Image (cartoon, grey):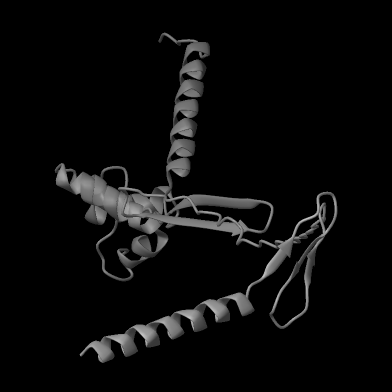
Amino acid sequence: MKWVKGVAYTFLGILWLIIILGTAAFAVTQTNTSGSNTNISGAYTGGSTTYESGSTSSSTTTNSTTSNIRSAPYTSAAPSLGSMNNCALALSAGVQNFSIGVSAGRHFIDPVCQTINLSKALHGMGMKVAAISVLCGNPEIFHAMSAAFANTPCPIEGKIGAEATKILFEKYNGKMPTYEQYLKLQLKKIKDQKNKIKIEKIKPNIVR
């Protein structure tokens, strides 16, 4: 057993020497000189590397950005026209370009619809003659209710039926009466009465 231990120690010693010699063979020598370049040389491939003191590194970065933003123009909002009147028609419109916008709105009243509503209102208050008179302001209704068609003449000066027809032909010459015509005839009637009174005052009374 002793000779085995001797061989083992001998083998370890030889191995230790090989490691030391191999490390010495690949040792690197570095020499520094103040104020000059540093030269690093050794047992490696690639030669020597020289680092120059006071070297300058310069980096320049240029960024150029161009933006072209196009957005849609504002929308011209047409006004909202609400109405509680069923006979009113609301119309609105708007025009818009890239610089200016214009909008407008207006109400339009349907005269036929308004006439019907007024007639219904008068009839609801019990004024039936007045309600029919409102409708008779329309020439088509007046002609349709005349004696030549339905023989239910429109009221004239508060008269209905045959009396209204008589007044129509005697006073208005069979033409559709209007408020303007009525006022004109009434003013003429008042004027004639005044002239008659003046004549009676001027005319002397004869006593027999």
- Quarter of the image with the N terminus is bottom left
Rendered location of residue 190, percent (x, y) = 45, 27
Q: Quadrant of residue 146?
A: bottom left
Residue drawn at (31%, 86%), measured in percent from left and top?
A: 6
- Quarter of the image with the C terminus is top left
Residue drawn at (61%, 51%), measured in percent from left and top?
A: 102
Residue drawn at (60%, 62%), measured in percent from left and top?
A: 72
Front residue of this view, candidates 154 and 10:
10
Residue drawn at (22%, 51%), measured in percent from left and top?
A: 120
* Furthest-right residue in this view: 36
- Asked if 200 appears above or below 42 in the picture, the reply is above
Front residue of this view, candidates 127 and 52:
52
Q: On the rendered structure, is 77 left or right of 149?
A: right
- Asked if 38 appears above or below 43 in the picture, the reply is above
* Furthest-front residue in this view: 2
Front residue of this view, candidates 51 and 153:
51
Rendered location of residue 166, percent (x, y) = 32, 53
Rendered location of residue 3, percent (x, y) = 27, 91
Q: Is residue 161 visible?
A: yes
